[in-house]
Amino acid sequence: MWVDLSEDELRAYRSSQTDPADFDAFWADTLAESRRHDLAVSVTPIAVGLTTVEVFDVVFAGFDGQPIRAWLRVPARRDERLPAVVEFVGYGGGRGHPMENLLWSSAGFAHLVMDTRGQGSGWSTGDTPDPAGTGPAFPGVMTRGIESRETYYYRRVFVDAVRAIEAVRTVDVVDAERVALYGNSQGGGIAIAAAALDGHVSAVVPRVPFLCDFRRAPVITDRPPYREIAQYLKAHRHSVERVHETLQYFDCVNFARRASAPAWFSTALMDGTCPPSTVFGAYNAYAGPKQITVWPYNEHEGGGIEDDAIALEALRGVFDRAERH
Amino acid sequence: MWVDLSEDELRAYRSSQTDPADFDAFWADTLAESRRHDLAVSVTPIAVGLTTVEVFDVVFAGFDGQPIRAWLRVPARRDERLPAVVEFVGYGGGRGHPMENLLWSSAGFAHLVMDTRGQGSGWSTGDTPDPAGTGPAFPGVMTRGIESRETYYYRRVFVDAVRAIEAVRTVDVVDAERVALYGNSQGGGIAIAAAALDGHVSAVVPRVPFLCDFRRAPVITDRPPYREIAQYLKAHRHSVERVHETLQYFDCVNFARRASAPAWFSTALMDGTCPPSTVFGAYNAYAGPKQITVWPYNEHEGGGIEDDAIALEALRGVFDRAERH
Amino acid sequence: MWVDLSEDELRAYRSSQTDPADFDAFWADTLAESRRHDLAVSVTPIAVGLTTVEVFDVVFAGFDGQPIRAWLRVPARRDERLPAVVEFVGYGGGRGHPMENLLWSSAGFAHLVMDTRGQGSGWSTGDTPDPAGTGPAFPGVMTRGIESRETYYYRRVFVDAVRAIEAVRTVDVVDAERVALYGNSQGGGIAIAAAALDGHVSAVVPRVPFLCDFRRAPVITDRPPYREIAQYLKAHRHSVERVHETLQYFDCVNFARRASAPAWFSTALMDGTCPPSTVFGAYNAYAGPKQITVWPYNEHEGGGIEDDAIALEALRGVFDRAERH
Amino acid sequence: MWVDLSEDELRAYRSSQTDPADFDAFWADTLAESRRHDLAVSVTPIAVGLTTVEVFDVVFAGFDGQPIRAWLRVPARRDERLPAVVEFVGYGGGRGHPMENLLWSSAGFAHLVMDTRGQGSGWSTGDTPDPAGTGPAFPGVMTRGIESRETYYYRRVFVDAVRAIEAVRTVDVVDAERVALYGNSQGGGIAIAAAALDGHVSAVVPRVPFLCDFRRAPVITDRPPYREIAQYLKAHRHSVERVHETLQYFDCVNFARRASAPAWFSTALMDGTCPPSTVFGAYNAYAGPKQITVWPYNEHEGGGIEDDAIALEALRGVFDRAERH
Amino acid sequence: MWVDLSEDELRAYRSSQTDPADFDAFWADTLAESRRHDLAVSVTPIAVGLTTVEVFDVVFAGFDGQPIRAWLRVPARRDERLPAVVEFVGYGGGRGHPMENLLWSSAGFAHLVMDTRGQGSGWSTGDTPDPAGTGPAFPGVMTRGIESRETYYYRRVFVDAVRAIEAVRTVDVVDAERVALYGNSQGGGIAIAAAALDGHVSAVVPRVPFLCDFRRAPVITDRPPYREIAQYLKAHRHSVERVHETLQYFDCVNFARRASAPAWFSTALMDGTCPPSTVFGAYNAYAGPKQITVWPYNEHEGGGIEDDAIALEALRGVFDRAERH
Amino acid sequence: MWVDLSEDELRAYRSSQTDPADFDAFWADTLAESRRHDLAVSVTPIAVGLTTVEVFDVVFAGFDGQPIRAWLRVPARRDERLPAVVEFVGYGGGRGHPMENLLWSSAGFAHLVMDTRGQGSGWSTGDTPDPAGTGPAFPGVMTRGIESRETYYYRRVFVDAVRAIEAVRTVDVVDAERVALYGNSQGGGIAIAAAALDGHVSAVVPRVPFLCDFRRAPVITDRPPYREIAQYLKAHRHSVERVHETLQYFDCVNFARRASAPAWFSTALMDGTCPPSTVFGAYNAYAGPKQITVWPYNEHEGGGIEDDAIALEALRGVFDRAERH
């Protein structure tokens, strides 16, 4: 069943999330701090038994110079520098197995899949620790360090993501001018944030994105991971405002207001995990060129492989136009 | 939690499924009937936007000459005839989207994914109807036509599977001497049956196979799809013996007794969908060379991509040895 | 809890279902085709151990001449031709056991309970196969053949229902001028359709009817069987419009617009299976004389035996008036 | 899935329930007390709109002379005194609507359905209060007054049941020598108890009976109503032995040891509500002639209408033999 | 997620519950009848092993003179008469263990916790029977005797509560002029009713109160205990109006209209058990001075210990001001 | 229902957990490292509005000198040094609100409740961060740092617990010779570990203890928190042995083998969270004097307040005997 506003209402909906005056300063400082560390990209070929695709184990310096792992996959046969797709992954997963996730490289792109620190023990595995501790938190990462913007978990992740873009641009087979961001759910939210923070990506593809409209999301759905925030505030009754002060620095609604790359969003009207109004909260605020696919009978899987087909065509168009310049 | 016998008990377990005297005759007649129809293989290239892999829309004559669809994926670059992996899919799914499922072709094999007739509206889509009707049945395909071996749904599917093997052997890029069967869950069960019925495949990889040990499965688990049988018998109280008479012609325990290809099984001790004793019922009866991976903390996902890594290494070994002959 | 609109809103609600121009032509053609087959009614007495009621096993030619079974129950003692109640049954059930369902015959009516083809393996049993196959479908019958109006499952069922009315009129103990239709849930939907298609029944009693307002139902409830449609479209994302084009030929809202017999509907405000607005979608469109009982604290059981008590009194009134003419 | 012992183990199983020395004295005293009150049977015809069956509203003096209601249904046409079936109903229900439950009267028997005091607000309705209060109790009737055998709820119900048999024997259309007891679940338990206490019934039909093997039942199933006992003891940790001292006076295992009428039990191997070992606990202890139908794929519905068909044939045989004497 | 109206709507919401003309007369008569019995307070010290708090087992005559038990806890060291907090407990619980619930006495108050008759077998235990029987009722106490205001369960409980206040005033260590009422959920509802009926208490603290707005509550939530009413009416379809006629004499909305003591309510926006609009139904109607704490991220636990901290400060203020007079 | 072995089997059960050769060396080193930091106990009175109990906010140096918070509650009136109860709390909770949990201080003991680092956002709140990061982990703390014994979360917690004992001994109102440990579930496990590591406590009260028998627990129950381990291993299939190598240094079975203080265990036969065999795994291995209370009808609440009553009597006995020495 439809879980949220009607499609007309969705298109008219505007998020109530506010834009803190020092949002940009906070992020400029945050990035500057981490950029003091050398990016330290290492790219190591690994044998996985494939013949059409080569896989590399990538490490680069993320937040505070901490090592972040990724897989880079490229077509075995390639003549020129390749456009790149940087992928961020959904909640609980990691970069997975080197043998998985062959679409983007089989389509002729360089494909970097970044681990999400401390995650990677759910639907896919990860290899990257999160060296930071946390105050009292509800299980999951949503409330780790949430009592201040400095310690909040996603501060570290968003910096990792920006550094991943910077890292992929340094790889010799990659055309640094043609980098797109792609992600599903949490990965979609990270993609929006990273696009805004980096400022130079060619395109961004947030599929059923998470991390949007934090004032609204946890009060209109009972499902994790948004529910983790509600669970935390259920216990920490006096932290409501402090938590929301933190979250406004991480809400993709606020990043969307700062983005300029062309974007291909998707959302689903039966998605109780990332309800469509929270996605439209970000989409309607998005400052760059944009399109959104609305799947009327889907849940959090959204368009699934159909979203990929749309994205593949869109990215090929973007990259081809970019190349011709 | 572990849902079944201990691993020691599993290794000692023998299925109580009986082997009807005319099992082989029934299947010989069934195949002979369908083989009267021309195989009528058509292989049409389709554009899916990939560069390293080519995809073909395949149609061939399955049970009673009815058209069955499949995707054939092959590496774009290839010098010689390729060994082939024929994949059968899990319950409720279909051959899916041409852009999905790129592992086997990226590994350098020809990869045929057969639609399961009348399914393909669940976790992936299909394009093949099942023209046969049914008596009163419980929702799902498990009890369609179950009151006789002639009309039972899987009679048609197993013939389709044998014909898929025959079809892939006719494709020009394929080395007809090197064909392996692969499948997950229902696909694993179909693979066992087809391996036994075909008699000439190079290897079979049944991962967490379904369709095994029909006397036991529906009374030790409450989960679909085995539960569909119990639900049918709950309503049709007088059909218990008739249904089990039908099922003994379709039980992979009986096919396993007739198989000769080397096999790589897997099973998981927390798998409540295809409980490990039912898998061991088939595995312990399997007449060919065999190995089984037991995943102690997994559910019906079994080894997931790790099972694929094992299979890839195993199949490469089998195919390489076959080639040297 | 109340699951839908308030009662005031329900009474004002109008379905958005549209009425295809060739709706009547489609059904006229469909019925004409099946009527080419002889009705071939057979009525066989069976011994069930009752003394006040006699039971007959009835077979007649339904869609495309295919045999459909029913039970006919009549009071053992009868002096004249009896008015008849034709009953269609709820989703998943069948005509059941000859010994069940004695109300209408104990009230002095002839009572015919029609099997629903291919169903009858759930809450009651059936004996009638559905010889037609299907394209890829979600488990259950809701999406069998749904990609075209010609192949859709309910095309066959609605013809069976019309033929059942015609069949009961041929039985010697029945007064052909006094036939009412009765059904619960799916049976209620079939009753509305059959009343409209037949055009001559004395009354129709749709209790908490299903098969109404197909644009709305699958997006306001998560419960099967409406959910089967949503599940199908979740997989077959490109079939949304095609499926709805099919469904408009089967929506009881459109049949209600064509009905003329007096009708006694019921609905329940806590019914999440057939939400009350979908029932009111049909009720408010119903073109004949009509009444509706609204049960405020009931779920899909609606008024249960109380609905029967209302129906019994209503039908006795209708039949008595009809007899006096 | 099967929820309990294997069928072989079930047949060998013996309940650990003990037989208190003063069991018979307790019940003799209890019955004697209530029999001091006049039975005060009133039988009032009511109009329900049926033609083959007549329905009477019956009231009689149950426990402590308190009025208990029942429906009596008899065939409208009858020539001689009829054998009678006294039915006790399942947990939560009541005698229901006069128009329901027509099988036994349609088969030519007098059929008395007794209300269960204080119940009758669940799957069917009742009209009989329970004037007795209760100590602290868990919701439901299982623990009302459970701290002593004098105050326990079922003391009153079992007396009501014995008095119902006595009442039906006084009705003029009934042949007092031919009275059988019938019941499903709770009704089956009451039937066993009443058969033992009355001592003169012609037969007893306990279908999937409840109220058996109280030491075992609440520790092998989590489902209500047995769970109510476990829930009570969860709160009242010091009452474990006192509660079991009470229950041994009400356990059908102990009544079964005292029964002499021929009995037709049924049980289902997937019944998690009244697990089969508890039924076999009573069945194996049953002192009279006995048969049991074991349904391998059924849950608490047991044999459903098939159990009725078996019972009807069995009772007709018993009654016919009794008549010939 | 938020389960009800927005906070703005909640503050504007007015219950539709009506105020029967003889409400006051009914309760005046009811109290007068029970007050004919001597209050018969007994206060017995018991040894529980605490050193800072003394515990007494209290019995007094409640409804119709029936004995009601309570614990009285007082600080071991005390110089003068103490203000008292009378606590009523939540649904299913009882006065509990003497060793539990030490807050109010540790804060220097006399603390009386009244048993709720017939309950006390759930989350805490009780020791007080309910000697009254019941008509057919749904499991739980919500529908016991609900067919008339005379027999309804809460008539007895509300009288018990008024008598508890009168009883605590007689205890020698208590300052009879300073008695406050406190309760959570059901206890909060009882507190509102008792405050209105007694008319002289110093303050009332209804936390997430139950028993409010009976027309609305069972149709906006599916959770017990409100659901018990809906379940009863689901079976007893003809009792809808009679039940609501009874309930209007017990609805805390109507008691709130008659209350004068200062009140500290609380409610939670995610509370599906006692939805916030039903609490605001009572709060907005409350005639005395009032405050309400709204917890945005809490469920039925409301403010938990934070509500206690607020209450402790409030009561200390009330009692201090009262003492100074 | 009973979820595990029978009580006889439980008493005979011996855990298969092995005892690593360097277990004692590992813990000696670990403690020595942390003891290099000054204990730095601070004890600050706070005003919470109670009159019989005083509450202090305590901070001390835990693992690696990191600050750990606790509440210390003592009777307001006290003449001599008090015996102390150190409490560790259950999974997900924290030291809670200063106003809660008054039993032990009201009984005349000093009562220290230690925060569990990084937890305290569930059923009660905490105030202590965990400064350590983690590798990829499943939500919750069970798998934080689990890939090595050095980084495992409970290494830090167990050291905190030992230091809490040392801290309470330094408080002036406490009799350092009389310190007992108490805990429920996770708190019970921590108590066993801390008792073994400290070596000098007067008694230990592990109620339904968690953290026992790590080989068995996650394969016999599906419930969190043991399930977190299974979920981690489901994703990290190659870590099974490494994880179990870590866990053997933290299994309370191994600590129990080293304990000498008299112990009062409890367990419940319906406890699916900490199944009784895992508790008996530790209990049967426990090297000191011991008793266990087995609650037959309880779940994870175990004996609840009844366990406290037993513990209070036991501790008073232990402390009195200790004082007399």
Image (cartoon, coloured by chain):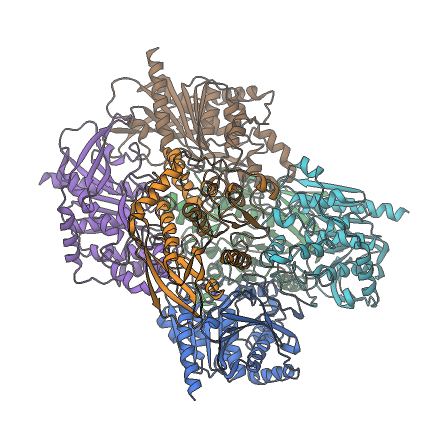
Chain colours: A brown, B purple, C orange, D blue, E cyan, F green
Q: Name the foreground residue: C318 vs F35.
A: C318
Between D208 and E324, the residue placed more toward the observer is: D208
Residue in view at x 58 percent, y 46 percent? C2
Q: Residue furthest left?
A: B325
Residue F213 versus residue A190 in the image, above or below: below
Relative side of B224 to D79, left or right? left
Quadrant of residue A216 within the rendered picture: top right
Q: Is residue D292 above or below residue A73?
A: below
Classify residue A136 by image quadrant: top right
Residue F207 x, y percent position in the rendering = 56, 58
Q: Is residue F119 above or below residue D195?
A: above
Residue B308 visible somewhere in the drawing? yes
Say which quarter of the image contains residue F105. bottom right
The picture places residue F119, in percent across and down from the top left corner, at 56, 43
- Residue situated in front as seen by the camera: F253 or D184: D184
C156 lies left or right of D315: left
